[in-house]
Image (cartoon, rainbow, N blue to C red):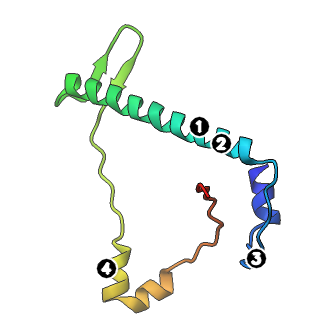
Amino acid sequence: MYEVIAQYFHTAKQTDVVRLDGFDEKLTRREEIVETVAALQEEQRKIEQEVKVCIGSSQHAASGQYRVTWGNVDSVKLDTKRIQEEQPEIYAAYGRTSHYRRFEVRAA
């Protein structure tokens, strides 16, 4: 469903303003959900920190019902800002532009 919406409405008309009559209750509920998700994510981070303190420098841990791994991960990422500054021709040759629409809700 989300892909269909993006397919049909992929470009925004910057001059249009649509009235969202009847949406205040839904948008208020959306804000409540956003706040609840943020609170749950914070609780999740706290639990994870407690577990990490117990694990310490070990990689594996176990409880009665769970196995936990907190291992090392190495990854290599390109410093695109530096490439753009120091090698603009390479950045231009290999850079890829993405187009999308950002959805934001703010109180009036």
Of pointers 4 and 1, the one earlier in the residue sequence: 1
- Front of the two marks 4 and 1: 1
Q: Nearer the viewer, mark 1 or mark 3?
A: 1
Tag 4 near tag 1, CB within 8 Å? no
Residue position marked by numbered label 2 in the rendering: 28
Question: Are discs 2 and 1 less than 8 Å apart at CB?
Answer: yes
The residue that disc 3 covers is 13
**Is 88 situated left or right of 28 in this image?**
left
Q: Position of residue 6 (x, y in %)?
A: 75, 61
Q: Crowding at label 1, few (<14), some or many (≥20) Cα neighbours within 10 Å?
A: few
Cα distance between the residues tagged 2 and 4: 42 Å
Whole-number angstrom distance, CA of label 1 to CA of label 3: 29 Å
Q: Which residue is mark 1?
A: 32
Vertical placement of 27 versus 39: above or below? below
Amino acid type shown at disc 1:
Glu
The picture places residue 102, in percent across and down from the top left corner, at 62, 63
Q: Nearer the viewer, residue 102 or 24?
A: 24
Label 2: element kind: helix
Can residue 69 be seen by looking at this rendering?
A: no
Q: Which mark is residue 51?
A: none
Circle 4 residues within 10 Å: few <14, some 14–19, many ≥20: few
> How far across and how far down the image is residue 101, in percent?
66, 66
**Mark 4 or 3, nearer chain start:** 3
Q: Which of 2 and 38 lies nearest the eye of the viewer?
A: 38
Amino acid of disc 3: Lys
Residue contact between numbered discs 1 and 3, judged by CB atoms under 8 Å: no
* Residue farthest to the front, as pictured: 108
Q: What amino acid type is highlighted by mark number 4?
A: Arg
Name the quarter where the C terminus is drawn: bottom right
Name the disc covering residue 82, or none.
Answer: 4
